[in-house]
Image (tube, coloured by chain):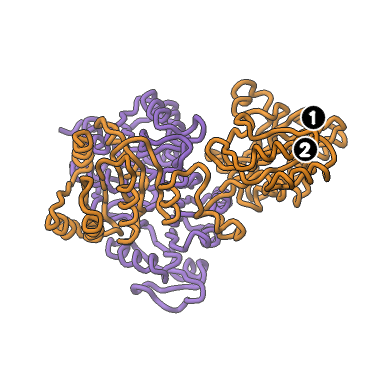
Amino acid sequence: MKLFEYEAKDIAERFGIPRPKGMVVETPEEARRAFESIGGPVALKSQVLVAGRGKAGGIRFADSADEAYRVAEALLGSEIKGEMVSKLLVEERIKVKRELYAGFVINRTSKRYSYLASTEGGVDIEEVAERSPEKIVRGDVDPLRGLREYEARYIARRMGYRGRQLLELGAIIKRLYDIAVSYDGELIESNPLVETEDGAFVAADMKLIVDDNSLFRHKEYEGRAKMAGPEMTPLEARARASGLAYVDLEGYVGIVGNGAGLTMATLDLVKEYGGEPANFCDMGGTATIERMIEAIEIVLSNPRTKVLLMNVLGGIIRCDEVAKAVVRIKEKMGFAKPMVIRLVGTNEEEGKRILSEAGIDSFDSMEEAAMKAVELARGA
Amino acid sequence: MAILVDANTKVLVQGITGRQGSFHTRLLKQYGTKVLAGTSPGKGGSDVEGVPVYDTVREAVEEKGVNASIVFVPAQFTKEAALEAIEAGLSPIVLIAEGVPVLDSMQILARAGEKGVTIIGPNTPGVISPGLCKLGIMPAHVFEKGVVGVASRSGTLTYEIAAGLTKAGLGQSTCVGLGGDPLVGLSFIDVLELFKNDEETEAVALIGEIGGNAEEAAAEYIIKTNYPKPVVAYVAGRAAPPGKRMGHAGAIISGRTGTAESKLEAFKRAGVEVARKPSEIASKLREALGSP
């Protein structure tokens, strides 16, 4: 779960990382007052979660209280890459000498946090890493020992700093790590971390992504986990609220499977046979009838779906329960869209009997089922 | 002699009194796995399916001599249970739970590394050496003893593929579910290394998926070691868009990393036969093994 910039900065501040003076506003009038209280040129930053808000016009500047009012009026309620702006962070404009990058990310290969730091901040760090890898300071942190202060200072040293600056930057890097560990951060970064004209360091931007699986120990965000994210379609939001793994795609063959790998393989087969999947929907290995029905309903309610392809390999999930779910859906929604069901595993015979009594064919082979679904969708 | 688990594996079930723990204890015993003890803090002295329950792992080790563990406790408590098993020196330790925080996994794996303990998972169906030992939750009937070693990042897709192998007359030496999380104990390379030295295993099937670069690393390892046994690979997620989690926490294309194309390319470069459909794995393995 990605936090808003102002939330990440509030956390940073509590950990002792300097940030620009600023406040969150929700109306143009508040923006005017924020300008007056800051008392100088400000940046008005849209609080959205989509990436690339700067290029999309989500960050603007004001040199007077009236201008702050007008800019806030224009930004609030507008959409940045489809995400509605309801809050702005109004901040003092800092005098930049140099833009740095500092962050920690979970490294899947070393199975540790990796730190990344660079004196080439303010841009996409992956690009810097590719273009000039010598400009990046990186390494891993021992998870049992944690990042030590001397290691953080060594990172600052390798970025070229000495004296008071080395101590200050080292402290900021150490605190970024402490936040990552305290908040189960999948990623924490300050980009840019600004070196000001008077030689201080200020976190001009801040990003923190909290591991969704850790929310049980971050109660303040728990409620948000089931809420729709800004990049979600309405069906993705509905599926999330029901605890289903669902992703909307561009095609027309609706897909429900059990297990992530099996469901992905089903999508791939549909493509292999010349069709296009409308979605990914994994109802999980332990779905109840209610959950199966919800999954099927979501997929069928997608207007792009022409055919439903269901692929179930029963284990803990029983085939007779799957069949009952399908029949219940058929009774409820009628048969507006054809269904192709592949059903094997626990209580397979009973499941197939229930389906055939309801006039629904089922397949043993997922490949035959995928082929049939593509054929029907193309004829539809 | 298979890898990781065999007839000498003496199993502890952690979280044995829970719904999952007790249900699977029955299935494990039915399969013939030597389940010698269970733990459930506060419930020591009772028994589940005829298996004695202890409060602590240490007692189970001292009294029953268990040497491996399968952990059924919920995700929030997996770290504590795993660390207890690691300190007692059990290996392998299978972590079934889905939803373990990555930071917990990081600490579990680091400590296991220090103690030389093998962790399988989290978010795994476990490991099975057909006919010898099942240390997992997989439906046993789809597996059969044989010569193919299987390593996979997924659950149900592994059952699908194992069933296909069995139907084609290709049994399995050991099937290892690596787990669907971003951080897991065993990599494809670790398992390839074990299969390399296993007399029972004549060919290997790798079942990968999008996310991370474990498949690319495996391909490099195969080239570097001039891997002596035929390998067939399948990668799920060719139709997956970037930036979206496809069910598994680890199945996500981040930027340019983790695409199916990159993995398939890497395998091809390493001379690995790539199956485009799950059913092709069996036919490609038959060819590689020279079976009719």
Residue at mark 1 to residue at mark 2: CA–CA distance? 25 Å
Q: Residues within 10 Å of mark 1 (few under 14, many from 20)?
A: some
> For the residue marked with disc 1, what is the amino acid?
Val
Describe residue A73's horizontal placement relative to residue B279 as left or right: right
Q: Chain of mark 2?
A: A
Give the x, y percent position of residue A84: 57, 42
Q: Chain of mark 1?
A: A
Above or below, A154 relative to B224? below
Q: Residue visible at 24% across and 42% down?
A: A307
Q: Which residue is mark 1?
A: A96
Q: Secondary structure at mark 2?
A: helix
> How many numbered circles does the render carry?
2
Give the x, y percent position of residue B77: 52, 62
User: Camera-side residue: A231 or B115?
Assistant: A231
User: Can the viewer see residue A85?
Assistant: yes
Q: Which residue is mark 2?
A: A66
- For marks 1 and 2, the one nearer the N-term is 2
Give the x, y percent position of residue A18: 79, 43
Q: Secondary structure at mark 1?
A: strand
* Residue sitting at the far top: A131
Give the x, y percent position of residue A69: 73, 40
Label the purple chain with its letter.
B
Above or below, A2 relative to B272? below
Q: Nearer the viewer, mark 1 or mark 2?
A: 2
Describe residue A269's horizontal placement relative to residue A218 as left or right: left
Describe residue B4's horizontal placement relative to residue A335 as left or right: right
Q: Residue visible at 30% across and 41% down?
A: A305
Q: Residue visible at 79% across and 41% down?
A: A35
> For the residue marked with disc 2, what is the amino acid?
Asp
Residue B61 numbered tag: none
Give the colour chain A carries in the figure: orange
